[in-house]
């Protein structure tokens, strides 16, 4: 008897916009982006850049970024960042080689 076990697409919870900083070790925030099934998004953008900014008195201050390679048949991309301070943040997803914003979201980290 043969069987085949595959993992399906993850089903994340509904998006949150508030996270809690519980310890001095920081808090981890998971970012999930579903790729639209156009003419293979992964061929158009082989890598996506996730960039986090913190709002400092009305100005966006860079915090961290990460480049994620997109597999040719991918239907989603996800990554996680660790944050060590409270405040208002923004995540922006762009192609690695471009400034074109594909997606963005705002969130808050509080104690």
Image (spheres, rainbow, N blue to C red):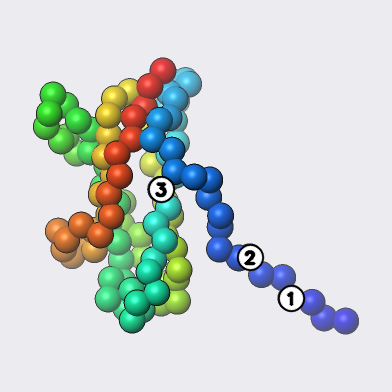
Which of disc 3 and disc 1 is earlier in sequence? 1
Extreme top residue here? 111
- Residue at 23% across / 33% down in the picture? 54
Structural crowding at the residue carrying mark 1, measured as other residues with C-alpha within 10 Å and reported as few (<14), some (14–19) or many (≥20): few
Say few, some or many: other residues with alpha carbon within 10 Å of mark 2 (under 14 / 14 to 19 / 20 or more): few
How many angstroms separate mark 2 from mark 3 (CA)?
Answer: 19 Å
Q: CA distance from mark 1 to mark 3?
A: 29 Å
The answer to whether the residues at label 1 and label 2 have Cβ atoms under 8 Å apart is no
Q: Position of residue 98 (x, y in %)?
A: 16, 63
> At 42% across and 52% down in the image, what residue appears?
32
Question: Residue 11 appears at what percent x and percent y?
Answer: 56, 55
Tell me the tag on residue 63.
Answer: none
Which quarter of the image is occupied by the N terminus?
bottom right
Residue 7 shows in this picture: yes
User: Label 3 crowding class (10 Å Cα cut-off): few <14, some 14-19, many 20+?
Assistant: some
Residue in the picture at 63% in, 65% down: 7
Where 87 sits versus 28, above or below? above
Q: Nearer the viewer, residue 18 or 52?
A: 18
46 shown above or below 57 = below
Quarter of the picture containing the C terminus is: top left
Residue 16: image location, x then y, percent = 43, 38
The secondary structure type at the circle numbered 1 is loop
Where does residue 44 sit, x and y in percent of width and height? 27, 76
Residue at disc 2, secondary structure: loop
**Real-space CA distance between mark 1 and mark 2, rounded to the nearest whole angstrom:** 10 Å
* Residue beneath disc 1: 4
Viewer-side residue, 90 vs 13: 13
- Residue 76 appears left or right of 96: right
Whether pointer 1 and pointer 3 mark residues with C-beta atoms closer than 8 Å, the reply is: no
Disc marking residue 7: 2
Q: Which residue is mark 3?
A: 31
- Residue drawn at point x = 20 percent, y = 57 percent: 101
């Amino acid at each position: 008897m043969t069987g085949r076990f595959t993992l399906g697409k993850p089903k994340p919870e509904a998006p949150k916009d508030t996270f809690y900083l519980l310890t001095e070790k920081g808090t981890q925030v998971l970012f999930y982006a579903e790729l639209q099934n156009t003419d293979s998004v992964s061929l158009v953008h082989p890598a996506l850049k996730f960039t986090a900014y913190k709002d400092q008195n009305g100005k966006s201050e860079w915090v961290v970024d990460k480049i994620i390679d997109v597999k040719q048949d991918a239907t989603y991309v996800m990554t996680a960042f660790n944050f060590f301070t409270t405040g208002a943040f923004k995540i922006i997803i762009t192609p690695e080689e471009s400034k074109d914003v594909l997606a963005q979201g705002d969130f808050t980290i509080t104690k």
